[in-house]
Amino acid sequence: MRRDVFQAIADPTRREILSMIAHKSLNINSVTENFDVSRAAIYKHMKILTECGLLEIKQHGRQRFCEGRLEKLNEVSDWVAQYREFWDKRLDSLEVYLQELQGKSKKHGKKK
């Protein structure tokens, strides 16, 4: 099954794992200890993150470390940006319209 970044971040547990490894690599045990679910469940989440390219597991001696590859989150950022631009334009138009209404309201208020 081909997974993408959107599937990876859809789950709160996976988002939490990403937050944990965003700034430093952690060994797998350190990650799994932070959750109240089975180690196997966390491994499944890590597998999905790895398949999506957001997580890399590296062997250092006897330990395995999780390292974030968060550049792939740019796909999400790019996708959201198109909607941000759309809403910015809509809200700017609304602001202009409301200012025009206020201007008309002030003109009518002075005539009274």
Image: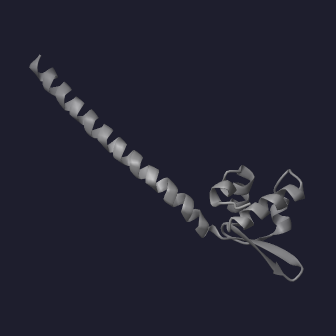
Q: Is residue 71 left or right of residue 18?
A: left
Q: Position of residue 75 (x, y in %)?
A: 55, 62
- Identify whether 97 is placed above or below 1: above
Q: Is residue 26 left or right of residue 95?
A: right
Residue visible at 82% across and 79% down? Answer: 59
- Identify whether 63 is placed above or below 105: below
Report how many numbered discs are placed on residues in the image: 0
Residue visible at 69% across and 60% down? Answer: 3
Q: Position of residue 45 (x, y in %)?
A: 78, 58
Q: Quadrant of the N terminus?
A: bottom right
Residue visible at 81% across and 57% down? Answer: 34
Q: Residue furthest bottom?
A: 61
Which picture quadrant has residue 99?
A: top left
Identify the image's colour scheme: rainbow, by chain, secondary structure or one colour.
one colour
Which picture quadrant has residue 52?
A: bottom right
Q: Position of residue 71 (x, y in %)?
A: 59, 69
Q: Is residue 62 left or right of residue 56?
A: right
Q: Position of residue 66 (x, y in %)?
A: 76, 70
Nearest the eye: 51 or 28: 51
Q: Quadrant of the C terminus?
A: top left
Q: Residue furthest left?
A: 111
